Amino acid sequence: MHYYLYKLRFTSTLHIGNDSGQDNLASAEYTIHSDTLFSALCIEALNNGGEKLLQQVYTVFQNGQAVLSDAFPFRRDELFLPKPIWQQKAHAQTDPRERKLYKKLSLLPLSLFKNYISASETVPFDVHKATALLQDLFFYEQRQCVAITGQEETQPYFIGGVVFNDDCGLYLIAGCANNEIKQRLDGLLQSLASSGIGGKRNVGFGRFNLDNALALAETANPSLQMLEALLKEQNSAAYMTLNTSLPEKDELSGIIPGARFLLCRRGGYVQSNVPLNAPLKKKSLFAFAPGSCFTKTYHGAIYDLSCGGQHPVYRYLKPLFMGVPS
């Protein structure tokens, strides 16, 4: 598998509703789950190449010839990873005044990732430096709008969004088995940049510029070289998910022992080229959140949540793992 880094530089507000499903329109998240990215790519495939291209995209991801991470923040050359839910003993013994900082720290700078894993009482992790690097990546915006159509009286409502600061945005990691798959993914992501991702694209939300893909195998950046090595690690004490994933039923019993994980709710509405009488909600389920750690890997699946609808409704929940160094 060859791994590539894509940077998304947003030119407009990004609206991604929260995972809880409560007050979804007014809320905003600063990451994008891999199942949302995959669904958006499927729609671009359908719009650009019809059912044939959509089936090709589905097949390469289902067969494991391509894999996507969640989209996480970056600032210039610094990437941020989910904090692994694994080693906590050394950090639990730190100064009580710093415990709140550790608790609030949901992302780790890639340049400090190994320092976090190897931290001890004698060589503590610099939580203040990590926190400082995360400052001002973005700011929240709440836009007031008014509903008129079908209303006897105008109804105000709010749309939550995220605006990224200069030199900041989101990145994703894609694994491709060959160059043909990578070129197809490049084209779909370029199309998605114009269409936008997330909610309220009809009013201009979610547009971005896409940097050229960076092959991790060809970079001279030490942090990215480390990242590629961890993505290819096959003999690690633990493996951390870099995306939102869910094992199949027959895999669960083998991966739960020794695992440490968080669950996130995955719901939302169906996007369709077929006219619908009313917005149709997808079947909700819970998946392992990014940062979950396991002693064994699993395959996961692409689930069809259509429930007998007019076309498939795919939920991409196949994992992308990286080794957690001991």
Image (cartoon, rainbow, N blue to C red):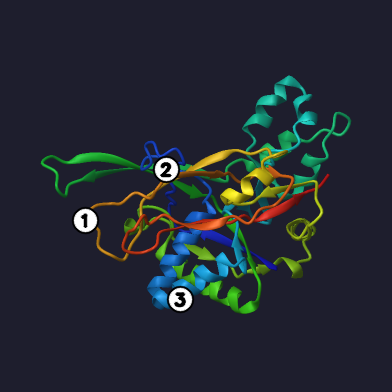
Which label sits on residue 4?
none
How far is the residue under mark 2 from the one under mark 1? 31 Å
Write down the quadrant of residue 295 in the picture.
top right
Which label sits on residue 53?
3
Tell which circle, 2 or 1, labels the residue nearer the N-terminal end: 2
| Quadrant into which the C terminus falls | top right
Label 2 sits on what residue type? Glu
- SS at mark 2 in the image: strand
- How many numbered marks are there? 3
Label 3 sits on what residue type? Leu
> Which residue ends up furthest to the left in the rendered image?
152
Tell which circle, 1 or 3, labels the residue nearer the N-terminal end: 3
Query: How far across and down, in percent of the image, does residue 133 sit?
Result: 67, 43
Depth check: 316 or 85 in front? 316
Query: How far across and down, in percent of the image, does residue 134 sit?
Result: 63, 42
Residue 108 in view in this figure = no
| Quadrant into which the N terminus falls | bottom right
* Residue wearing tag 1: 277
* Residue wearing tag 2: 141
How far is the residue under mark 1 from the one under mark 3? 27 Å
Q: From what the image shows, is residue 294 above or below residue 221? A: above
Depth check: 243 or 113 in front? 243
> Which residue ends up furthest to the right in the rendered image?
122
